[in-house]
Image (spheres, rainbow, N blue to C red):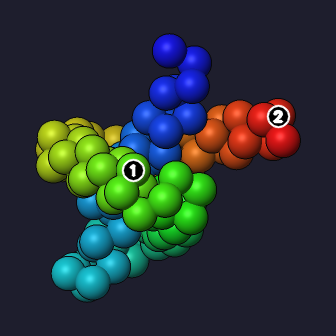
Amino acid sequence: MWHILPSLLLSISLGLSWNRFLLTFTSRTERLQNQMPVTMVAAAVSLSALALSVADKGLLLGGMLVLLGLALATISKSLPHPVIIVGLSAVSLATYLQFTVHAL
């Protein structure tokens, strides 16, 4: 069970930050401008999780993790409180990084 947890953390990190990251390309509203720091963090977290999924796990498993993360993004699309959601995503990525540091 514990060997699956780091991979799930990557998927969670990607899934919770992906929708906010996509707002950068789809929306230029005043609301987005007011929450630009949250969007910047979401962009950094989602791109990091995407890159680590493929780099650390390989193309096949990494692709499956990305698909799992995108499925979570679809489910979490209607969740309120983007600051909390992106914060959870960043914590998930940081926890994954702690797992990989201790594994070395």
Q: Is residue 80 above or below residue 32?
A: above
Q: What is the x, y in percent for residue 93? A: 59, 46
Q: Is residue 72 left or right of residue 89?
A: left
The residue that mark 1 highlights is: 61
Kindly indicate the quadrant of the structure image that contains residue 26.
bottom left
Q: What is the secondary structure assignment of the residue under circle 1? A: helix
Identify the image quadrant of the C terminus.
top right
Looking at the image, which residue is at 52% across and 67% down? 51
The residue that mark 2 highlights is: 102
Looking at the image, which residue is at 41% across and 63% down? 59
- Tell me the amino acid under the disc marked 1: Leu
Q: What is the x, y in percent for residue 84? A: 45, 39
Q: Nearer the viewer, residue 15 or 35?
A: 15
Q: Is residue 101 left or right of residue 50?
A: right
Q: Is residue 86 above or below residue 41?
A: above
Q: What is the secondary structure assignment of the residue under circle 2? A: helix
The answer to which of marks 1 and 2 sits earlier in the sequence is: 1
- Tell me the amino acid under the disc marked 2: His
Q: CA distance from mark 1 to mark 2?
A: 21 Å
